[in-house]
Image (spheres, rainbow, N blue to C red):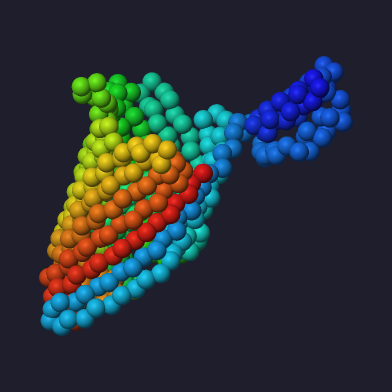
Amino acid sequence: MKKVIISLLVAGAAIAANAQDKALLETLVKKGMLTQQEAAQIAKESVTVTPATKSTKSIKIFGGAQGWYTWGQDSQKAPTSESKQTSGFTLRYVKLGVEADVGGGWSATVVTDFGSDGASRNYLDKVVASKKVDLDYLNGTLQLGLRKANMGYEQNMCDFGQLAIERSVATQFFTNGSYNDDAVVKNFGGRTIGVFWDGNITQVEGLYYSAAVTSGLTESTPEFISTSQDSSALSFYAAMGYKNVAEINGESLAYDFGVNFGYAPQGMTGRLVTQKGSVWGINPYATASWKGLTLISEFFLQQFEDYVTPGRDGIGRTPLGANVTVAYKMDIGEWGAIEPVARWSYIYANGAPVETEFFKNYLNQAMTGYIGVNWYAMASVKTSLGYEFGYYDQRVAADSVDRLYSNCVRAQVQVIF
């Protein structure tokens, strides 16, 4: 009976310990607590991940899936009245990742995405080699590979951690945007390949900064990973921020504010662009979290050279926009937690323009409002329902309309591990 109990305990420890299985079993056999046959049987039934190098300390596997149902309608109101609808199911994100700590402060992360956006980046979501640095005046992480640049607070939130179901119209326009289909692509923000540094100012607790030098291509360009050699100019990003926790009436108030900046000398490209133009942008943001309440606000200002309009090559466009999101998460006992969410988003494109989904109209101004609710049955399972209304006006192209309304309802089920 003693051996049976020991065998069960060892089996559980073996499964949890992975790389230490063999050494532990051999020790117990030498001490006579297990026979060689019992140790062999336990080893056979255990699941073991064997690293390629002996220095590897840990291997973590993670991921998740997110399924959507979407119903949407665009309604033209001037000069003619017409509506178009769409509805259907989508696998928005289907991610599987591996993170390995190989020792000496080095780690590697590979994340794939087989969801609806995956194919445009060859199914790679993030691929980085990281090195932690902790010196007297230098503390942070150096990364080399594919990841998001620090531009847009909502854009850099985890795909599975979004408060609204989908990112806002402003986030899409300023950080992941093309305008005029693939004819003109603004390669600024979003995923890109390069060298990234995320650091902390050790002398001032809570003060952080970042810098990056990247390829001139990002995820807006089809097959950007395999054609990165076509980029003839680097892009540059920098950020500075401060985050901390304050006590108010015995409750913790967590806050974070900062600013992102970027410059892409050849960030405007596409099949209709006669010459690549430059893009620069600034993105201040502020967030606060108190009890179950979360507030997020950010502002976008960009300037780029437009080489599309005939006879006006190189004209400077300066679009601006903003996001404001409010959410309140409430515990509902054995049912988990529920979280109402509201978001307002705005763009003034200054002739860029903003592209609508179904009619392919090109308008100068956009304003959207989102209301929804998230239900967390448990930490790893989230169900969401949301409605977003959009108002677009001020035509840019001669063949566009003057005014358009959009309505969109989305439902989501998300499971992460």
Q: Residue at x 26, y 63 (%)?
A: 277
- Against 411, residue 136 (above or below) is above
x and y percent of residue 51 in the render? 66, 38
Residue 94 lies left or right of residue 317; in this view the side is: right
Q: Residue at x 86, y 25 (%)?
A: 35
Which of the pair 333/85 is nearer the observer?
333
Q: x and y percent of residue 126 in the render?
A: 47, 49
Q: Nearer the viewer, residue 168 or 150?
A: 168
**Tally of numbered discs:** 0
Residue 145 in view of the camera:
no
The quadrant holding residue 39 is: top right
Q: Looking at the image, which residue is at 20% across and 60% down?
A: 368
**53 and 157: which is toward the camera:** 157
Q: Quadrant of the N terminus?
A: top right
Query: Which residue occupies the foreground of this view, 190 or 393?
Result: 393
Q: Is residue 382 left or right of residue 261?
A: right
Identify the residue at horizontal 51%, vertical 47% (top origin).
Answer: 63
- Residue 167 in percent (x, y) is at 31, 55
**Looking at the picture, how far across and down is residue 411, in whole percent?**
37, 59
Q: Height in image: 360 above or below 299?
A: below
Toward which corner of the image does residue 80 lie, by quadrant? bottom left
Asked whether residue 14 is in view, the answer is yes
Q: Please, which residue is most extreme toward the top here?
A: 31
